[in-house]
């Protein structure tokens, strides 16, 4: 995987990551590790002003999203936060004008800093089913939470076998 445009900083026993000269990147893939150590954090203001970023992929090694990390990433519409993330610092997603969908994988809400979603417009926070009260208690009532349903996918290769596939899948 290319780490073009990314810069890594020693952080605890791993690395934090940010942008070096990659503000032009439209697809940012943060690797799980760098030089044999895990990438554990998104650096403070790490990706601020990545105006062309359409997608950002965060690996499940990241536990912290730093202050102002994605501030002013104007074109980014959606971001998925892995369940490994325990802390989202203040203003992490501030002024992300097109952000409309945040997908949270954790059943335990990460600690959320003040103004994390300030000046973003209407953002839907997709959360695991049955976690709405925990997220509201942790993050407040100002955000719009949507519980995700468990997705069911069946691979039907032979026409007319849907009932058998459903039975075999345990539904």
Image: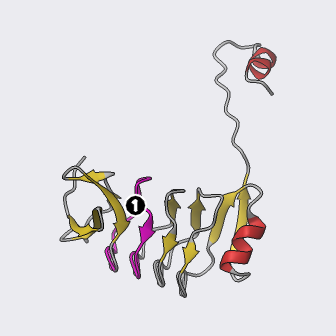
Q: Is residue 149 magenta?
A: no
Bin the neighbour count of mark 1 within 10 Å (Cα to Cα): few under 14, some 14-19, many 20 and up.
some
In the rendered structure, which segment of residues is drawn in magenta? 45-71
Residue at x-position 40% and y-position 54%: 61
Q: Is residue 65 above or below residue 71?
A: above
Is residue 54 highlighted in magenta? yes
Front in this rendered view, residue 77 or 29: 29
Which residue is depicted at the point 42% across and 76% down?
Answer: 74
Camera-side residue: 35 or 96? Answer: 35
User: Looking at the picture, how far across and down is residue 160, in whole percent?
Assistant: 77, 13
Place of residue 95 in the rendered image (x, y in percent of width and height, measured from the top left): 47, 84
In this view, the residue farthest toward the front is 13
Q: Could you tell me which quadrant the C terminus lies in?
A: top right
Percent coordinates x, y for residue 39 in the rendering: 32, 58
Residue denoted by label 1: 56
Magenta span dominant secondary structure: loop
Q: Quadrant of residue 42?
A: bottom left
Q: Name the residue rendered at 22%, 65% in the picture.
A: 8
Task: Give the quarter of the image for residue 169.
Answer: top right
Q: Is residue 63 above or below residue 35?
A: below
Query: Observer-nearest residue: 39 or 150?
Result: 39
- Secondary structure category for the residue under label 1: strand
Locate residue 9: give its quadrant.
Answer: bottom left
Image position, residue 146 (x, y; %): 72, 63
């Amino acid at each position: 995987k290319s780490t073009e445009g990314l810069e890594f900083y020693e952080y605890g026993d791993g690395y934090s990551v940010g942008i070096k000269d990659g503000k032009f990147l439209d697809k940012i893939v943060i690797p799980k590790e760098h030089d044999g150590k895990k990438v554990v954090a998104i650096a403070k203001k790490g990706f601020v002003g990545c105006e062309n970023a359409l997608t950002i992929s965060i690996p499940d090694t990241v536990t912290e999203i730093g202050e102002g990390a994605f501030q002013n990433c104007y074109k980014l519409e959606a971001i998925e936060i892995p369940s490994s993330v325990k802390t989202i610092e203040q203003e992490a997603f501030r002024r992300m004008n097109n952000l409309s969908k945040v997908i949270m994988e954790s059943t335990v809400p990460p600690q959320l800093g003040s103004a994390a979603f300030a000046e973003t417009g209407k953002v839907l926070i997709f959360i695991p089913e049955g976690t709405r009260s925990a997220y509201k208690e942790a993050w407040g009532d100002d955000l719009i939470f949507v519980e995700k349903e468990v997705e069911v996918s069946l691979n039907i290769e032979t026409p007319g076998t849907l009932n058998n596939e459903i039975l075999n899948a345990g539904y």
